[in-house]
Amino acid sequence: LQNTPVVEAPGLVVGRARKDAPNKYGCVVGLEESHEVVTRVAAAKVKAATDKENKVEDFWAKWRVPAREAEAALKEASGSPGAMKEQKGAYVGRLKALYVSREGKAPPGAWNNKLEADGEEGKLLKEVRKVLAEHDESAVPTTPTRLSVDDAAEEQV
């Protein structure tokens, strides 16, 4: 009875957000499983938000140190990403980290620095130059610090 419409051709259609909405055939006053559905949907929203936060934290955990090292290498090279090639270390890796540092996201498909048809500069170096022109500051967030038990108690008060 609960899975059949009350009226065969309703005049007013109720908008539904989900396929498993408890009101898919009209108003439901009390349904045993409605609390379970609401709880499950709320838990899914919390999980999605947590997954997104963890993804961002993992991204910066991976890129924070290389991005800071690339910023230091850029400063040592007098602000020229092309001059960083003369320094010791992985040049393309530093270019990628520099892109991440300024843009806050990974380079779009420009993961190598092979010379273009004109033979002057690679695609990654061109992308980094463009990003450096657009952004003056690094987008790397500060390193999170763990609170001690005393600090956590003070924040709750």
Image: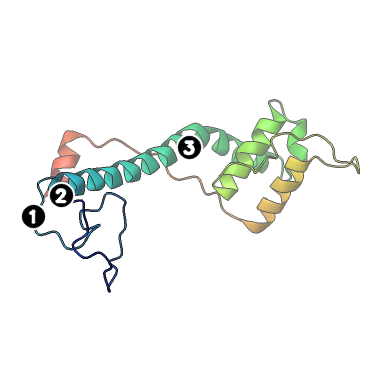
Front residue of this view, candidates 58 and 85:
58
Label 3: which secondary element: helix
> In the picture, residue 70 is in which quadrant?
top right
Q: Position of residue 24 (x, y in %)?
A: 25, 57
From mark 3 to mark 2, how far is it between C-alphas?
Answer: 38 Å
Residue 146 lies, in percent from the top left, at: 29, 35
Q: Position of residue 140 (x, y in %)?
A: 50, 45
**Which label sits on residue 85?**
none
Q: Which residue is mark 1?
A: 30
Q: Which residue is mark 3?
A: 59
Question: Label 1's element?
Answer: loop
Q: Amino acid at mark 1?
A: Gly
Which quarter of the picture shows residue 111? top right
Q: What residue would you read off at disc 2?
A: 34
**Nearer to the camera, 106 or 78:** 106
- In primary-sequence order, the first of circles 3 and 2 is 2
Query: Which residue occupies the foreground of this view, 33 or 38?
Result: 33
Q: Nearer the viewer, mark 3 or mark 1?
A: 1
Crowding at mark 1 (Cα within 10 Å: few <14, some 14-19, many 20+): few
Q: Judge whether residue 153 can be spotted in this image.
A: yes
- The residue under the point 70% across, 40% down is 110
Q: Are marks 2 and 1 in contact (CB under 8 Å)?
A: yes
